[in-house]
Amino acid sequence: MSMEVWDTRNRTIVHQIAKGAAAISGTLDNLAMSDQGSGTARIPMTGHGFVAGSQVLIHGSTNYDGLHIITNVNDVDTFDISVPQLMDSDRALPAEVFGGGEFCGVAIYGAAVNRSFRFIEARLHLSNTAADETITMTIDSGYGAVFDCVPKSENINGKTSWDWLPDVDLFYTKDDILKWTWANGNTREWGFELIYEVM
């Protein structure tokens, strides 16, 4: 049996943001990352749609897992992240050819802050009405795939804004990942904010 003990004396509210004009999540390409120097890695993701300043999670890679801020959008198929902590003694980043299935997009990952967390709210704003599509939050459980589930899935057809504020507390361990997906087939510009509490 696993038990999580919450310290209610030390709490931090996190606001995590991302912006773009394509799907809010996808997978990396089956291509190599490119070392741009000074600890900057160029990440291949065809048609990613993200905007500089967005916070995205990479998950499933060998070296680049974690929550990253996009520092530069080189083109529609690549973006840069700053990972100087990964540089070796020659100031080079670890080479990696991605497998093509690594998750990249909007997500909350407790391990990124090394803390368990309580989900508070999700806010989505669109430049125009959404198509007949569904926005979904999936739990990639730290206890294994048999515990994965979908606590939220909602059609947002015709909406220009969407907000989810659960009426019950949703607690997660630091090894859980809350992955968000929405196809955005009509390529609306969007801003997505996730609010959660780490404890």
Image (cartoon, helix red, strand yellow):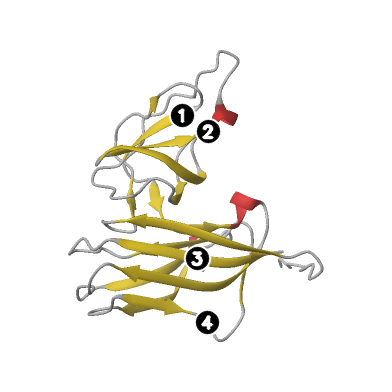
Percent of width and height locating residue 48: 29, 48
Q: Amino acid at mark 2?
A: Val
Percent of width and height locating residue 76: 24, 42
What residue sits right under mark 2 in the picture? 83
In the image, 159: left or right of 150? left
Front disc: 4 or 3? 3
What residue sits right under mark 4 in the picture? 166
Label 1: state its secondary structure.
strand
Front disc: 1 or 4? 1
Label 3: state its secondary structure.
strand
What residue sits right under mark 3 in the picture? 194
Q: Is residue 94 above or below residue 73?
A: above
Mark 1 touches mark 3? (CB < 8 Å): no
Whichever of labels 3 and 2 marks the residue nearer the N terminus, that label is: 2
Residue at the (76%, 69%) spot, across then down: 6
Mark 3 to mark 2 CA distance (whole Å): 23 Å
What residue sits right under mark 1 in the picture? 40
- Image quarter of the N terminus: bottom right
Q: Name the one closer to the observer, 5 or 9.
A: 9
Label 2: state its secondary structure.
loop
Query: Which residue is at the far top?
Result: 90
Residue count near mark 1 (Cα–Cα under 10 Å), binned few <14, some 14–19, many ≥20: many
Mark 1 to mark 3 CA distance (whole Å): 26 Å
Q: Is residue 125 above or below residue 87?
A: below
